[in-house]
Amino acid sequence: MRNLFPLLFAAALLPLGMPAGAKTSLLDYVGQCVPFARAASGIAIYGDAWTWWTQAAGRYQRGDIPRPGAVIVFERTSRLPLGHVAVISRVVDSHVVMVTHANWSRQNGERGHAEQDVTLTDVSPRGDWSAVKVWYRDMDGLGSTIYPTYGFVYGSTLDHGSRAQPAPELTGRDPDYVGALIDSYVR
């Protein structure tokens, strides 16, 4: 599957207006969070973002500890009627991670763009990642909204027959760890 990733990702970008011979990058993606998370994590789940948690049951390992390459699944709410999924790109500390995701902040006045190494912080009372805040470009910091989550879907299948391969562009070379901690702990 790892060798097929560039071809599959290029094919996924064709309907989005990318020319067939164009050099494609995960970060050039514009669209919904679900196809992006699937391409970035290698986890083969389809359907609305909020359904990933139940769809993963019996197929993929799930839990409440962030790991690079895992997908965090946001619950469906009035603000997120289809939920949201984001891929963990870096673990900064036990309550702060960085995610790479699509269709969150506005860029050039529109949603859908991919964002790499965005701060996400655990604000749950039990420290179990069941409630998070997400860095939002329009505020240039953590948003004020608290989003409920189900947990993390990991790339290993339960039958141990395969392991999803996250995209090489999942994280940048020099993520801003200090900025992520400042965003999370200075409120």
Image (cartoon, rainbow, N blue to C red):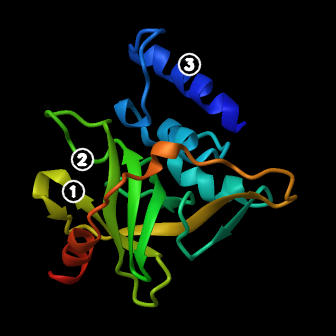
**Residue bearing mark 1:** 136
Q: Residue at x 20, y 64 (%)?
A: 143
**Residue at position x 59%, y 40% from top?**
47
Query: Secondary structure under badge 1?
Result: strand
Secondary structure at badge 2 equals loop
> How far is disc 2 from disc 3 in space, using C-alphas?
25 Å
The circle drawn on residue 11 is: 3
Picture coordinates of residue 50, whole percent (x, y): 53, 53
Q: Alpha carbon of mark 1 to alpha carbon of mark 2: how far?
A: 6 Å
The residue to which callout 2 is attached is: 105
Among the two numbered marks 3 and 1 on one chain, the one whose residue lies closer to the N terminus: 3
- State the residue lying farthest toward the front: 173
Q: Amino acid at mark 1?
A: Tyr
Type of amino acid at the residue the image marks with label 2: Ser
Q: How many marks?
A: 3
Residue 179 tag number: none
Q: Amino acid at mark 3?
A: Ala
Q: Quadrant of residue 124?
A: bottom left
**93 sits left or right of 146 in the view:** right
In the rendered view, would you say 179 is above or below 54? below
Reading the chain from its start, which is encountered first: label 2 or label 3?
3
Dot 2, how many residues are within 10 Å of its Cα: few (below 14), some (14-19), or many (20+)? many
Q: Residues within 10 Å of mark 1 (few under 14, many from 20)?
A: some
Residue depicted at x 69% and y 49%: 164
Q: Earlier in the sequence, mark 1 or mark 2?
A: 2
- Badges 1 and 2: C-beta atoms under 8 Å apart? yes
